Image (cartoon, rainbow, N blue to C red):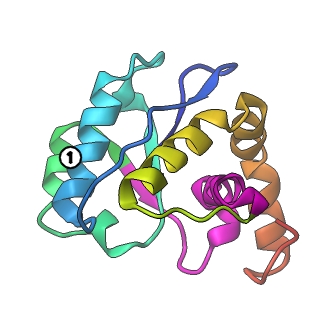
Amino acid sequence: MLMRLTNSEIVHSKLFVTDGTIDGATYTDAVINGLSKAKMDPPLDTRVLLSDNAGWHKKRDEMPRIERAKIKQKFLPPLSSDLNPIEHVWALLSSKLYENCAIYDTVDSLRKAVIKAWNSIPQESIDNLVLSYGDRLLECYSREGKMTKY
């Protein structure tokens, strides 16, 4: 989860790891718990949660819970991974996780490696991904939604 706390401070939060398959309730719990615990200036109810179109982000019975938590949610257009900062974070995470052709023998060793890789992503990389959103949006628009350099 990425959070922008102030105009000049962007931080990546603690990674949420689940043992099971993610579903609407699991996602909603993670969002509400993660965002409600974060100290934000300006406050959470003035912010927007940018989401892609994964099924668990739009679960009809979970949307009221997100609204009651005063979380405004906006959805990216379908097939717009260039616009989604978290997709770029997953790419960073994956490259760190599998550098030197690492292989993990157990789920627990993989989980520990994921958390270690997440924590090793430089803050500057997170800053650049969030702050380049406007450039990615403009390029996506100018290319009429087709693949961009991002």
Tell me, yes or no, whether the highlighted magenta stretch contains residue 36: no
Tell me residue 5's x, y (percent).
54, 22
Q: Give 56 or 70, whichever is nearer the viewer.
A: 56
Q: Would residue 128 appear left or right of 25 to someone viewing this image?
A: right
Tell me residue 148's x, y (percent).
83, 74
Q: Residue placed farthest to the front in the image?
A: 105
Total marks placed: 1
Q: Secondary structure at mark 1?
A: helix
- What residue do we see at 58% from left, 34% from top? 119
- What residue do we see at 65% from left, 20% from top? 9
Tell me residue 3's x, y (percent).
52, 34
Quadrant hosting residue 142: bottom right
Q: Would residue 59 appear left or right of 4 to someone viewing this image?
A: left
Q: Main secondary structure of the magenta part?
A: helix
Up-down: is 150 above or below 70?
below
Quadrant hosting residue 53: bottom left
Quadrant hosting residue 44: top left
Q: Amino acid at mark 1?
A: Asp
Q: Give 5 or 90, whichever is nearer the viewer.
A: 90
- What residue do we see at 53% from left, 79% from top? 78
Up-down: is 107 above or below 53?
above
Tell me residue 68's x, y (percent).
15, 41
Location of the C terminus (image quadrant)? bottom right
- What segment carries the magenta color? 73-100
Tell me, yes or no, whether the highlighted magenta stretch contains residue 85: yes
- What residue do we see at 77% from left, 81% from top? 144
The residue to which callout 1 is attached is 29
